[in-house]
Every structure is written in structure tokens, then in C-alpha cells.
Image: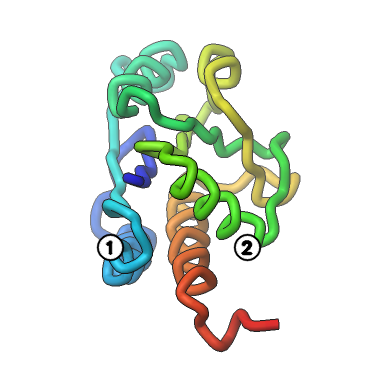
Amino acid sequence: MRVIIAAVGRLRDGPEAAMTADYIARANAAARSLGFRGFELIEVEGKPAGDQRAEASALFKATPDNSRKILLDERGAEWASRQMAEKLARWRDDGVPALTFWIGGADGASQSLKDQADEKLAFGRQTWPHRLVRVMISEQIYRAVTILSGNPYHRD
């Protein structure tokens, strides 16, 4: 299963970009041994900036056919790290070809993204800066990989 983080906007150099890249690289180090094709970040631009429909269109284009789609939204469900690992493993084992996490633009996600999402995931009820959300989802993907690999830190 291919796992994609599709996000509106491009991170320039900075700590958030470095941390996101680091967590994705760490997850990729174990991807194949756990049956994943890989983890990646795809950054898209919605033109004009701030146009939710244009942003949604760009995210749809970045999403592979037959992908399971998860919208990052403060009104979504809150998954524990172990739950996320279990979901990734179940979707992988069920033959889901791709999983795409959508991060909308600064003005939020369009209704079409909300309608097309298979699930919505929240990192609490607060609204987080989109730069940090990339770090948070990439870290949780990496954490899911460590859980699935049996890392001693996550054993009961």
C-alpha cells in the first residue's frame, strides 16, 4: 500500500519541512519489510490561493485512483497511535492500493473534500497550523510503523 500526505501549499526550508522529511524517511526505511510500497508528501498549489475549490481540485489530482481518503479536520475522529497502526495494517492487509491523507489550505477544507473523504481524522479539537499538521501526521505514520514492527517502546 502506498501512503501519501497530500497538502495544500509548499513548505520552504525550515524546521517543519525538515521534521516532516525526517519522519517520512524513517518510515520509508521500514516500509517494504512491513508490506508498504512507501510513504510520501505531495505538495499542491490551489490557484488562486485561498480558493477552496481550486485547492480541492489540486488535492483530488494528487490522489491515486482507488485510494482511501482521510481528511485531517478538527471535527474528525481522534485515533490513538495504536489505532492508527491497526487501521494502516488492516487496509494494507485488505489490499487497499493507496491511502491519502488530505491537508487542506489555510482557510480550511472545501465541502467537496469533506464529502469525498472516507474518514476524517483530528489531532484534538484545536485548529493547528498546517505546517505543524504535516509534521504531526508524518510522525504518526512513523509511529505506526514502529508499532507494527514491534518496537519495544510500544509493547504492552
**In the rendered image, which quarter contains the C terminus?**
bottom right
x, y percentage for residue 82? Answer: 64, 64
Q: For residue 81, which numbered disc appears in the image?
A: 2
Lateral position of residue 45 relative to residue 118, left or right: left
Q: How many angstroms separate mark 1 from mark 2 (CA)?
A: 20 Å
Q: Residues within 10 Å of mark 2 (few under 14, many from 20)?
A: some
Front residue of this view, candidates 152 and 136:
152
Three-letter amino acid code at the position of disc 2: Ser
Q: Residues within 10 Å of mark 1 (few under 14, many from 20)?
A: few
Give the residue furthest to the front.
Answer: 94
* Residue 18 seen in render: no
Image height of 36 relative to 29, above or below: above
x, y percentage for residue 19? Answer: 36, 66
Q: Residue at x 53, y 26 (%)?
A: 107
x, y percentage for residue 105? Answer: 45, 30
Q: How many marks?
A: 2
Front residue of this view, candidates 48 and 1:
1
Q: Residue at x 37, y 46 (%)?
A: 3
On the image, numbered disc 1 is attached to which residue? 32
Q: Secondary structure at mark 2?
A: helix
* Residue 141 seen in render: yes
Q: Where on the picture, by quarter, is residue 2?
A: top left
